Image: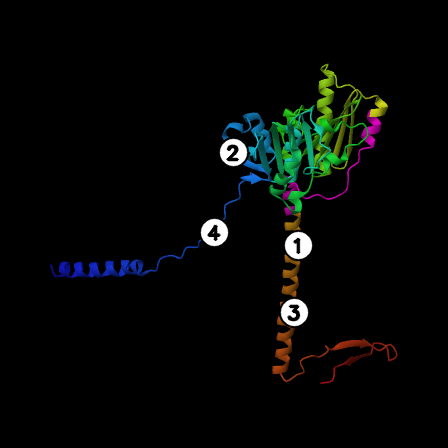
Amino acid sequence: MRFKFLFRPLLGVSLLLAISPAFGQSPAKTSVTLVEPAAPLLPKQFGSWQQQADLAAAAGPDATAKDVLLEDGLARFAASSYKRDSSAETIDIKAYQFADATGAFSAFTYLRSPEDRPLTAPPLGTSAVQKGDSLLIWNGVSVIAAAFQGGRHFADLSDLVSLMPKASGAKGLSPLLPTMLPAKGLEAETLKYSLGSAGYEQMGGLLPASIIGFDKSAEVATAKYTGRGTLTLLLYPTPQIAGDHGRQIEAELNKQIAAGHSFGTVKLRREGSLVVLATGAWTPAQAKAIAESTHLDEQLSWNKPMPLEFHAEVQKTASLLTSILQLSGALALIALVLGFFFGGGRATIRVLQGKPAATEPEFLRINLRGAPGETTTYKPLR
């Protein structure tokens, strides 16, 4: 019984000692990060136009267009109606912001219709096309679609374009592949630029999207030429990837031709990481000429991420070279340590024996000038 009464107070004291540090601890420090919200994609006012209503909920892209735009890197979307001061004129505007200029240009070619014609004046953005009272503008990472009612005031949109988001560095670079299309006979309004399977199929791609290699960061540009046919350019990150998919495309074309599908004149050519395909109403000589006149521009562009396979190979090579350097350094360090250990130990022992730390060993020398069989022994001086 005595031990029982003694055990209870001891248990209570131990519990207090155990929980007291928890109550004595100061509250954990928390960091506060101030995040400034992004400015609205469409302003309340630009020039003499005042925002009237938000149309984003009603004027958003349909499911098909949304898939293509998201594939192109759609970051933000906004739609509003604007009214001009002291007039009944209005504009319905849709604005799209993308992750980079490459995605914005792809969306621009997707939203552009064959009836659109280039807007020559006033210059708006990087490129602008017009159809009646409607206007489509590509400027950097932004695409603007505007529909006027009551009057065309295209020049007023320059104020809006100047307020749209800007991008610098690699994100602001225009895509390189469309510039490789030969200019002679090109119908610019038919140019389509695709970054994914949804966009390629919606833009009337000739080949099955599954063999293009969009999962390897492929880019595709297609365009028609006056009185001739269609030219398709496919750009890949590396020549090896281009070779693999070029052979797949060749096999698919041969398969479909054998099944009775007609592509007209067909000419397929690969140059480095570029695959050129001419199909349609070309003569054999024309198809060969345009395919051989399309060359890979050697300018470097870093606006597209490299595929995972490419990064994996680079990392493997870098890891191997790093391991070799580390092993070589470790072996050199071990050799130095062993040299100092054995050499220094031997010198220390000689000094403790009263001998010089460094000496030459005894050696035998054959005296060829002396009597036969006679040898002379030399010893180093002490």
Question: Would residue 228 appear left or right of 16 to someone viewing this image?
Answer: right
SS category of the residue bearing label 1: helix
Residue at the left extreme?
1
Residue 105 showing in the rendered view: no
Q: Which residue is mark 2?
A: 52
The reply to whether the magenta stretch includes residue 302 is yes
Q: Nearer the viewer, mark 4 or mark 3?
A: 4
Measured as percent of width and height from the top left, residue 126 is found at 69, 38
Q: Which residue is mark 4?
A: 34
Q: Nearer the viewer, mark 1 or mark 2?
A: 2
SS category of the residue bearing label 4: loop
Q: Is residue 51 above or below residue 8?
A: above
In depth, the one of 243 and 292 nearer the eye is 292
Residue at the front extreme?
86
Question: Would residue 144 appear left or right of 234 to someone viewing this image?
Answer: left
Looking at marks 4 and 3 on the same chain, the residue that comes earlier in the sequence is marked by 4
